[in-house]
C-alpha cells in the first residue's frame, strides 16, 4: 500500500519518504535535513503528516524541527532517547506500534549503535526501516552499546521474512562489501553480490533497499556465530 521514495542527502545519507494513498498520509524516516524532503513531498503533491526517527544522531534528526514547522507533522521516536530528541511528540519502544493510515509498524528495540536505537517493521509492506543498525553487508558501529547487543539485534532482524525489504540510512554497501569478502573469502554468494554492487555503483545506482534474505546470505555481522565473532569482525571493519 505504501509508495516509498529514496531521497539522497548529505554525502551518503538516505531519507525515506513513504506515502499511503488511502489516508493520504505521508511519513518521513530520519530526515537529516529538511529542504530536499519538503521539496520532494511538494513535487509529488504529498502532505507530510509524520516523522519516524530511529535514533538521535543529528544526521537522522536534523530536519525534524523545520519539517514540523512547515507541516505541523507528528514526530515519533525512541522513548529511551527522548532527552536527546527534543522535537519528539510520541515516544515508543519494543512492543509498541505506530501507524501510517491503515499500515501498522511494529517497533523493535535494537540498541548498540546508540543506546535507544529502534527499528520499524511493517509486516503488510514486507518492509523494515532500520536506521544505522543493519546495512547491506554491514552493521552500525558500536558507539553506545556492545557486541552482545548487536548480536541480539541480528537475531531479531534475521527472524523477519527473507523477502522483507530493508531500508537502511546510508550508502555504505561498497565499503562494507570490500571488508565482507575478507571476512568470508569462501562465500560465493558474497563474491557474486560484490560484483553486482561494484557494477551498480559504477553506474551511480543506489544499492539499497536490501533484503533480509540477501543479508542472511552475505552479511558477515548477521552471519557471525557468536557475539565474540561479531565483536572481532566489527573491530576489524573499524580498522579496515
Image (spheres, grey):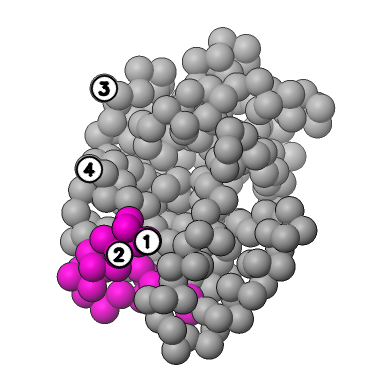
Please report the residue visible at 71 percent of the width from the left and 32 percent of the height from the top: 24
Q: Considering only order in the chain, which callout, 2 or 4, is on the residue closer to the N terminus?
A: 4
Provide the residue designation for mark 1: 240
In which quadrant of the rendered image does the C terminus lie? bottom left
Q: Crowding at label 4, few (<14), some or many (≥20) Cα neighbours within 10 Å?
A: few
State the separation of the CA atoms marked 4 and 2.
18 Å
- Tags 1 and 2 in contact by the CB under 8 Å rule? yes
Which element type, helix, strand or loop, lies under badge 4? loop
Distance from disc 2 to disc 3, alpha carbons, whole Å, reads: 33 Å
- Seen in the picture, residue 189 relative to 114 is either above or below; the reply is below
**Residue mark closest to the camera, 3 vs 1:** 1
Residue 104 in view of the camera: no
Q: CA distance from mark 3 to mark 1?
A: 34 Å
Q: Horizontally, is 10 left or right of 141 in the view? A: right
The numbered mark, 4 or 3, whose residue comes first in the sequence reads 3
Answer few, some or many: residues within 10 Å of disc 2's Cα (few below 14, many 20 plus, some between 14 and 19).
few
Q: Which mark is residue 144?
A: 4
Query: What residue would you read off at disc 2?
Result: 236
Disc 1 to disc 2, C-alpha distance: 6 Å
Q: Are marks 4 and 2 in contact (CB under 8 Å)?
A: no
Q: Badge 1, how many Cα within 10 Å: few under 14, some, many 20+?
A: few
Confirm or deny contact between disc 4 and disc 1 (CB under 8 A): no
- Seen from the viewer's position, the closer of residues 26 and 227 is 227
**Residue at (56% x, 25% y) in the render:** 33
Q: Nearer the viewer, residue 117 or 169?
A: 169
Between tags 4 and 1, which lies in front? Answer: 1
Helix, strand or loop status at disc 2: helix
Question: Residue 10: x, y in percent?
Answer: 58, 33
Look at 42% across and 28% down and name the residue there: 58
Element assignment for label 3: helix
Amino acid at each position: 500500500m505504501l509508495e516509498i521514495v529514496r531521497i539522497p542527502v548529505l554525502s551518503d545519507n538516505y531519507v525515506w519518504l513513504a506515502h499511503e494513498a488511502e489516508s493520504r498520509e505521508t511519513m518521513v524516516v530520519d530526515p537529516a535535513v529538511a529542504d530536499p524532503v519538503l521539496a520532494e513531498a511538494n513535487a509529488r503533491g504529498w502532505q507530510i503528516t509524520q516523522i519516524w526517527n530511529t535514533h538521535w544522531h543529528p544526521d537522522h534528526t536534523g530536519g525534524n524541527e523545520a519539517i514540523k514547522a512547515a507541516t505541523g507533522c507528528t514526530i515519533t521516536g525512541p522513548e529511551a532517547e527522548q532527552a536527546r530528541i527534543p522535537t519528539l511528540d510520541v515516544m515508543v519502544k519494543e512492543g509498541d506500534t505506530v501507524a501510517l493510515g491503515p499500515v501498522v509498524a511494529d517497533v523493535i528495540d535494537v540498541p548498540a549503535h546508540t543506546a535507544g536505537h529502534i527499528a520499524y517493521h511493517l509486516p503488510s509492506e514486507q518492509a523494515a526501516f532500520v536506521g544505522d543498525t543493519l546495512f547491506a553487508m554491514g552493521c552500525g558501529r558500536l558507539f553506545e552499546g556492545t557486541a552482545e547487543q548487536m548480536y541480539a539485534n541480528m537475531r531479531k532482524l534475521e527472524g523477519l521474512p527473507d523477502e522483507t525489504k530493508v531500508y537502511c540510512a546510508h550508502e555504505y554497501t561498497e565499503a562494507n562489501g570490500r571488508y565482507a569478502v575478507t571476512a568470508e573469502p569462501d562465500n560465493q554468494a558474497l563474491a557474486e553480490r560484490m560484483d553486482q554492487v561494484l557494477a551498480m555503483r559504477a553506474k551511480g545506482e543506489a544499492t539499497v533497499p536490501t533484503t533480509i534474505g540477501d543479508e542472511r546470505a552475505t552479511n558477515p555481522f548477521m552471519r557471525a556465530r557468536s557475539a565474540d565473532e561479531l565483536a572481532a569482525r566489527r573491530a576489524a571493519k573499524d580498522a579496515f
